[in-house]
Amino acid sequence: MVKTYKERFIKIVKAINSDILKQHAQLKKQKKLNFEAFSFLNKVYLQDFYSSEEPIL
Protein backbone atom coordinates (compact mmCIF):
# COMPACT_ATOMS: atom_id res chain seq x y z
CA MET A 1 0.00 0.00 0.00
CA VAL A 2 1.45 3.34 -1.02
CA LYS A 3 1.21 6.06 1.60
CA THR A 4 0.98 9.69 0.79
CA TYR A 5 3.44 12.21 2.15
CA LYS A 6 0.70 13.55 4.40
CA GLU A 7 0.10 10.12 5.94
CA ARG A 8 3.83 9.60 6.48
CA PHE A 9 4.15 13.06 8.02
CA ILE A 10 1.25 12.43 10.41
CA LYS A 11 2.76 9.09 11.45
CA ILE A 12 6.13 10.73 12.16
CA VAL A 13 4.54 13.59 14.13
CA LYS A 14 2.55 11.12 16.24
CA ALA A 15 5.70 9.12 16.99
CA ILE A 16 7.60 12.26 18.01
CA ASN A 17 4.73 13.46 20.21
CA SER A 18 4.57 10.04 21.86
CA ASP A 19 8.30 10.18 22.67
CA ILE A 20 7.94 13.70 24.07
CA LEU A 21 5.05 12.63 26.29
CA LYS A 22 7.04 9.62 27.54
CA GLN A 23 10.00 11.86 28.37
CA HIS A 24 7.74 14.31 30.17
CA ALA A 25 6.17 11.51 32.23
CA GLN A 26 9.63 10.19 33.15
CA LEU A 27 10.74 13.65 34.25
CA LYS A 28 7.64 13.99 36.45
CA LYS A 29 8.45 10.63 38.08
CA GLN A 30 12.03 11.71 38.72
CA LYS A 31 10.88 14.95 40.35
CA LYS A 32 8.65 13.00 42.75
CA LEU A 33 11.45 10.61 43.74
CA ASN A 34 12.58 10.98 47.33
CA PHE A 35 16.02 12.63 47.61
CA GLU A 36 17.41 9.81 49.79
CA ALA A 37 16.18 7.19 47.33
CA PHE A 38 17.74 9.10 44.43
CA SER A 39 21.05 9.40 46.27
CA PHE A 40 21.08 5.69 47.06
CA LEU A 41 20.20 4.63 43.50
CA ASN A 42 22.76 7.03 42.06
CA LYS A 43 25.48 5.66 44.35
CA VAL A 44 24.65 2.06 43.36
CA TYR A 45 24.64 3.01 39.67
CA LEU A 46 28.00 4.78 39.88
CA GLN A 47 29.61 1.90 41.78
CA ASP A 48 28.39 -0.54 39.15
CA PHE A 49 29.49 1.76 36.31
CA TYR A 50 33.03 2.21 37.57
CA SER A 51 33.52 -1.40 38.64
CA SER A 52 32.27 -2.80 35.32
CA GLU A 53 34.87 -4.44 33.09
CA GLU A 54 32.90 -3.64 29.93
CA PRO A 55 34.68 -1.32 27.50
CA ILE A 56 33.51 2.27 27.50
CA LEU A 57 32.26 3.39 24.10
Image (cartoon, grey):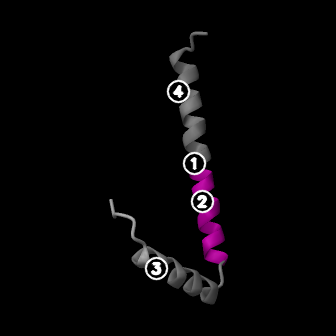
Nearer mark to the viewer, of 1 and 4 = 1
Disc on res. 8: none
Q: Name the spot of residue 32 as percent of width and height, x first.
A: 66, 77
Amino acid at circle 3: Leu
Number of the label disc, if any, that sits on residue 24: 2
Residue 20 position in % (x across, y down): 56, 51
User: Quick one: label 2 or label 4, which is nearer the N terminus?
Assistant: 4
Q: CA distance from mark 2 to mark 1?
A: 9 Å
CB atoms at circles 3 and 4 under 8 Å apart? no
Label 1, secondary structure: give it. helix
* Magenta run includes residue 31: yes
**Cα–Cα span, label 3 and label 2:** 24 Å
Q: Nearer the viewer, mark 3 or mark 2?
A: 3
Name the quadrant of the N terminus.
top right
Label 3 CA crowd tier, 10 Å (few <14, some 14–19, many 20+): few
Label placed on residue 19:
1
Query: Counting residues from the N terminus, which is met first, the one under dot 1 or under dot 4?
Result: 4
Residue at disc 4, secondary structure: helix
Q: CA distance from mark 2 to mark 4?
A: 22 Å
Q: Which residue is mark 3?
A: 46
**Mark toward the start of the polypeptide (2 vs 1):** 1
Label 3 vs 4, first from the N-terminus? 4
The span shown in magenta is 20-32
Is disc 2 placed on a helix, strand or loop? helix
Is 31 in front, or is 54? 54
Amino acid at pointer 2: His
Q: Which residue is mark 4?
A: 9
- For disc 4, the neighbor class at 10 Å (few under 14, some 14 to 19, many from 20) is few
In the image: residue 5, left or right of residue 56:
right
Q: Secondary structure at mark 3?
A: helix
**Which badge, 3 or 1, comes first in the chain's sequence?**
1
